[in-house]
């Protein structure tokens, strides 16, 4: 019997080492993070960590870091009155324009447009 390693892994099957790295990502997304640092937390070689992340989530570790930061920023844009620049800083982006580019790449709208849409909805 064989298993197709290209198919996504069910979330309940996430190895404990990977879960440790993911918990760290969720709690420390505002700090400088690199995929190899998360791989070290998982006690795995970077390439193996990347393959597992790709299999679980369908994205690369760097994309996972960005998506985690954007998700946190989305919550802050929706639930707080902080400025976009403050949210960018709090979510680990180096500056307002880098945050806006990354946010638009993921959501297709700028942070300001996202906030405006949330206020209307």
Image (tube, rainbow, N blue to C red):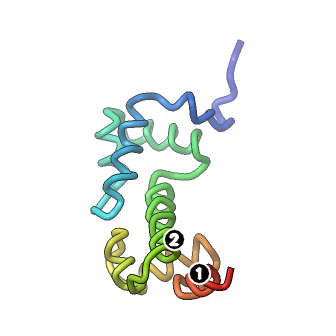
Q: Say which element carries label 1.
A: helix
Residue 118 in the image: above or below residue 21: below
Image coordinates of residue 115 in percent, x first then y, are 56, 83
Horizontally, is 31 left or right of 48 in the view?
left
- Which one is nearer the viewer's eye here, 97 or 2? 97
Residue at point 42%, 36% (across, down) = 18
Distance, label 2 to label 1, CA atoms, is 8 Å
Horizontally, is 56 left or right of 43 in the view?
right
Q: Quadrant of the C terminus?
A: bottom right
Image coordinates of residue 35 in percent, x first then y, are 37, 51
Q: Which residue is mark 1?
A: 114
The picture quadrant where one finds residue 20 is top left
Count of numbered labels shown in the rendering: 2
Image coordinates of residue 109 in percent, x first then y, are 61, 82
Image coordinates of residue 13 in percent, x first then y, are 55, 28
CB contact under 8 Å: marks 2 and 1: yes
Q: Which residue is mark 2?
A: 74
Residue at point 51%, 40% (across, down) = 51
Residue 40 in the image: above or below residue 112: above
The picture quadrant where one finds residue 97 is bottom left
């Amino acid at each position: 019997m064989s298993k197709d390693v290209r198919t996504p892994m069910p979330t309940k099957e996430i190895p404990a080492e990977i879960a440790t790295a993911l918990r760290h990502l969720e709690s420390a997304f505002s700090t400088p993070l690199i995929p190899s640092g998360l791989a070290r937390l998982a006690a795995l070689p970077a390439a193996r960590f990347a393959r597992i992340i790709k299999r679980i989530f369908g994205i690369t570790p760097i994309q996972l870091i960005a998506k985690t930061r954007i998700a946190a920023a989305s919550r802050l844009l929706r639930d707080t009155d902080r400025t976009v620049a403050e949210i960018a800083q709090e979510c680990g982006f180096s500056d307002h324009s880098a945050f806006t580019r990354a946010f638009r790449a993921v959501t297709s709208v700028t942070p300001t447009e996202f906030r405006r849409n949330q206020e209307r909805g």
